[in-house]
Image (spheres, rainbow, N blue to C red):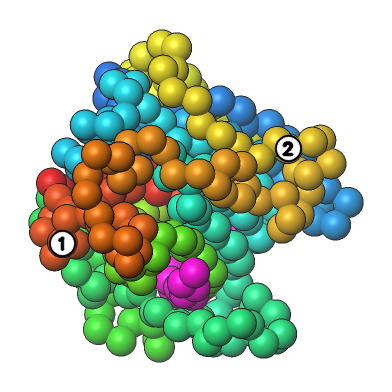
C-alpha cells in the first residue's frame, strides 16, 4: 500500500469551487468520451447522511478498451469497464474504484479549505501506519503532457474576464487572494509480490497528472461557470451526462466486475467507500501456465514488462477520479 497526500491550490474560494468542480467533471468527461469509450453515469442521486448531512452519490462505468496497454487488451473482453463510486459530502468527498485486477484498489478522500495548503492535520492528527508523503501541485507551473496542453488552459497567460483573476506569476500562491486548497489523500494498493512498489508508484504518477489537468481546467473554464447557481450546474451536469452516455453508446457488458455489495446503510461515511473485489484469486489469464516448467524453489510471481516503457503497465483514463488519465502507449 502506498499513500500520498496531494495539495492543489486554486485562485478560488471553496464555495466557488463547489460549482466549478461539478462543471469541470461533466465537461471533461464529455470531451474525453467517444463511441464505446469514456464515462457512463449509472447513478447520480441526492441522499442524506446522519454524520455528513446532505450529499450526492454517483456511480460511473469507465469504459477502458482503448485506454489499456496491448497486454491487457489481449486478455479482457472487447467491451470492458471498471466501476467508480463517489460519495460527495462537499467539502468532504470519497472516491473509490473496483478493478478487474483482484488485488488492486484506489481510494481517495478529498477535503477543501480556504488556505494555501497549510493544514497538516486536515485528515486527522492520528499517526498512520507509515509516513505519508505530501506533494504540492502547482496548476500554473507544473508541466502537463504535450498532448493535454492547450494554450487557452495555460494559467500563466490566462486571465478571467468575469473575475479579473489570472496571469498567475511565479510564486502566485503566496500573494493570491482569494485562494483555496484541494487536499487529496490517495491510497493505492496492488498486492502482488515483486510488483507492488513499482505499480503503486506508477499509479500515483498517473493520478497526480489527472489532478493537475483537472484543476487547471476548472480555473481555465471559470468564466463559463462562475455565474451558475447550484440548480443550474446540476441541470448542466444532467444534460451533459445524458449526452455523454449517448456519445459512448449503450450495450450489454461482456464482463462481470466483482464488487462489495453496498447495503442502503453503507452510503453514509468513509466506511462506505468501495474496497477491492470480493475475489482474492488471480484471474485465469494471470496464472502461470501448467505446462511451463518451473523450479520448485521459484516464487509464484506475476511478471509484466518493464514499466520504463510507456506501454508496459495498465493505464487509467484521463477522467479517473472524477475521474480518473491515460498514458499513451
Q: Distance between the residues labelled 2 and 1?
A: 37 Å
Identify whether 65 is placed above or below 301: above
Residue for point 52% across, 87% down: 131
Identify whether 123 is placed above or below 304: below
What is the secondary structure assignment of the residue under circle 2? loop
Image coordinates for residue 301, horizontal then vertical, percent: 33, 59
Residue for point 50% across, 25% down: 256
Q: In this view, does 302 lie to the left or right of 119?
A: left
Q: State the image quarter where residue 291 is shown.
A: top left
Q: Work out whether residue 206 or residue 276 is closer to the camera in this orientation and state it.
A: 276
Q: Is residue 145 left or right of residue 40?
A: left
> Main SS type for the magenta part?
strand
Residue count near mark 1 (Cα–Cα under 10 Å), binned few <14, some 14–19, many ≥20:
few
- Tell me, yes or no, whether the highlighted magenta stretch contains residue 11: yes
Mark 1 highlights which residue? 306
Q: State the image quarter where residue 78 is shown.
A: top left
Question: What are the residue bounds of the magenta stretch?
Answer: 1-15
Mark 2 highlights which residue? 262
Please name which of the two marks, 2 or 1, marks the residue nearer to the observer. 1
- Tell me, yes or no, whether the highlighted magenta stretch contains residue 89: no
Q: Work out whether residue 229 or residue 298 is closer to the camera in this orientation and state it.
A: 298
Image coordinates for residue 214, horizontal then vertical, percent: 36, 54
Q: Work out whether residue 190 or residue 89 is closer to the camera in this orientation and state it.
A: 190
Image coordinates for residue 273, horizontal then vertical, percent: 66, 51
Amino acid at each position: 500500500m502506498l499513500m500520498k497526500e496531494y495539495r492543489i491550490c486554486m485562485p478560488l474560494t471553496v464555495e466557488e469551487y463547489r460549482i466549478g468542480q461539478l462543471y469541470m467533471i461533466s465537461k471533461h468527461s464529455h470531451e474525453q468520451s467517444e463511441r464505446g469509450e469514456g464515462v457512463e453515469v449509472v447513478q447520480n442521486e441526492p441522499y442524506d447522511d446522519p454524520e455528513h448531512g446532505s450529499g450526492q452519490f454517483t456511480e460511473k462505468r469507465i469504459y477502458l478498451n482503448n485506454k489499456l496497454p496491448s497486454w491487457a487488451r489481449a486478455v479482457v473482453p472487447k467491451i470492458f469497464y471498471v466501476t467508480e463510486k463517489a460519495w460527495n459530502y462537499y467539502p468532504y468527498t470519497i472516491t473509490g474504484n473496483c478493478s478487474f485486477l483482484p488485488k488492486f484498489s484506489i481510494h481517495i478522500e478529498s477535503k477543501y479549505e480556504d488556505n494555501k495548503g497549510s493544514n497538516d492535520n486536515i485528515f486527522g492528527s492520528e499517526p498512520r501506519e507509515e509516513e505519508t508523503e505530501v506533494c504540492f501541485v502547482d496548476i500554473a507551473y507544473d508541466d502537463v503532457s504535450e498532448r493535454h496542453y492547450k494554450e487557452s488552459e495555460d494559467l500563466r497567460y490566462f486571465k478571467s474576464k468575469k473575475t479579473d483573476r489570472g496571469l498567475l506569476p511565479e510564486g502566485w500562491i503566496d500573494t493570491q487572494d482569494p485562494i483555496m486548497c484541494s487536499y487529496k489523500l490517495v491510497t493505492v494498493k496492488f498486492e502482488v509480490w515483486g510488483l507492488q512498489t513499482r505499480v503503486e508508484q506508477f499509479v500515483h504518477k498517473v493520478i497526480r497528472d489527472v489532478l493537475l489537468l483537472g484543476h487547471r481546467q476548472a480555473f481555465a473554464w471559470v468564466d463559463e461557470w462562475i455565474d451558475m447557481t447550484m440548480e443550474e450546474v446540476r441541470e448542466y451536469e444532467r444534460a451533459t451526462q445524458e449526452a455523454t452516455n449517448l456519445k459512448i453508446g449503450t450495450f450489454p457488458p461482456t464482463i462481470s466486475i466483482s464488487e462489495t455489495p453496498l447495503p442502503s446503510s453503507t452510503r453514509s461515511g468513509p466506511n462506505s467507500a468501495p474496497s477491492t473485489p470480493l475475489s482474492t484469486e488471480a484471474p485465469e489469464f494471470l496464472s502461470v501456465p501448467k505446462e511451463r516448467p518451473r523450479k520448485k524453489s521459484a516464487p509464484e510471481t506475476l511478471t509484466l514488462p518493464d514499466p520504463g516503457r510507456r506501454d508496459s503497465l495498465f493505464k487509467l483514463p484521463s477522467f479517473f477520479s472524477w475521474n480518473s488519465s491515460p498514458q499513451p502507449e
